[in-house]
Amino acid sequence: MKKQMNYWIMSTIVVMLICFTACKSEEDPQPQEMKRTYTMTSVSDPAINGEVTFLKLDENSTRITIELVGTNEGDTHPAHIHANSASEGGGIIIGLNSVDGTTGMSETTVMELNDGTAITYEGLLTFDGHANVHLSSSEMSTLIAQGDIGSNATGNNGGNGGNGGNGGY
């Protein structure tokens, strides 16, 4: 009888092990990264150009990254989102972190306009604006790179990251 009991316990353990190892755990799929990239063209220096990318972090915040090529080590270039299209011009609506000339990069997390009005990723995709990068804080009238964003971007530059121009929806 004891031998049968041991056999039954061992059989149960083996069946349970097989069941646990054979069962596949269903994990939630990772959400698709939602981002949109716009071209920034040279203005005063033909060697400088790049792109500005909006990456949705969550429902209330967006990371705006500017990546330029052709900037010089040690330089600092103020960056902003302005109202209206680049051809129309307009006031500063969102202040961004300056572009580091050594890396050509700037990253800013945005949740609101300078006046305190909330702005979401989706709001930025339809925003009537453009991005400017200036030569320096003492030479704000000299632009080194510029690009339309949101509703002003022709075809929204086709999107980026495999999003097919639809912001990742």
Image (tube, rainbow, N blue to C red):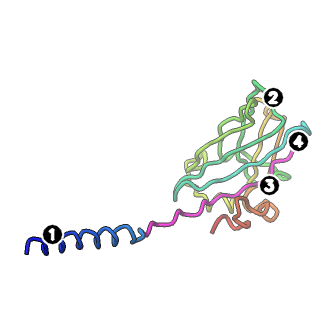
N-terminal-most mark, 4 or 3: 4
* Within-10-Å neighbours for mark 3: few <14, some 14–19, many 20+: many
Q: Which callout, 1 or 4, points to the residue nearer the camera?
A: 1
Residue 136 screen position, x and y as percent: 77, 29
> Which of these two is toward me, 94 or 20?
20
Q: Which residue is mark 4?
A: 43
How many angstroms separate mark 1 from mark 3 (CA)?
Answer: 80 Å
Query: Could you say whether the residue bearing mark 3 is in a helix, strand or loop?
Result: loop
Q: Which residue is mark 2?
A: 72
What amino acid is labelled 2 in the image? Asn
Residue 106 screen position, x and y as percent: 68, 39
Kindly identify the residue that appears in the image at 13 percent across and 75 percent down.
4
Q: Which residue is mark 1?
A: 6
Q: Which residue is mark 3?
A: 85
N-terminal-most mark, 4 or 2: 4
How many angstroms separate mark 4 from mark 3 (CA)?
Answer: 15 Å
What amino acid is labelled 4 in the image? Val
Q: Which callout, 4 or 3, points to the residue nearer the camera?
A: 4
N-terminal-most mark, 2 or 1: 1
Is the residue under label 4 in contact with that under label 1 (CB below 8 Å)? no
Q: Which stretch is magenta?
A: 26-42
How many angstroms separate mark 1 from mark 4 (CA)?
Answer: 83 Å
* Within-10-Å neighbours for mark 4: few <14, some 14–19, many 20+: some
How many angstroms separate mark 2 from mark 1 (CA)?
Answer: 77 Å
What amino acid is labelled 1 in the image? Asn
Q: Is residue 152 left or right of residue 15?
A: right
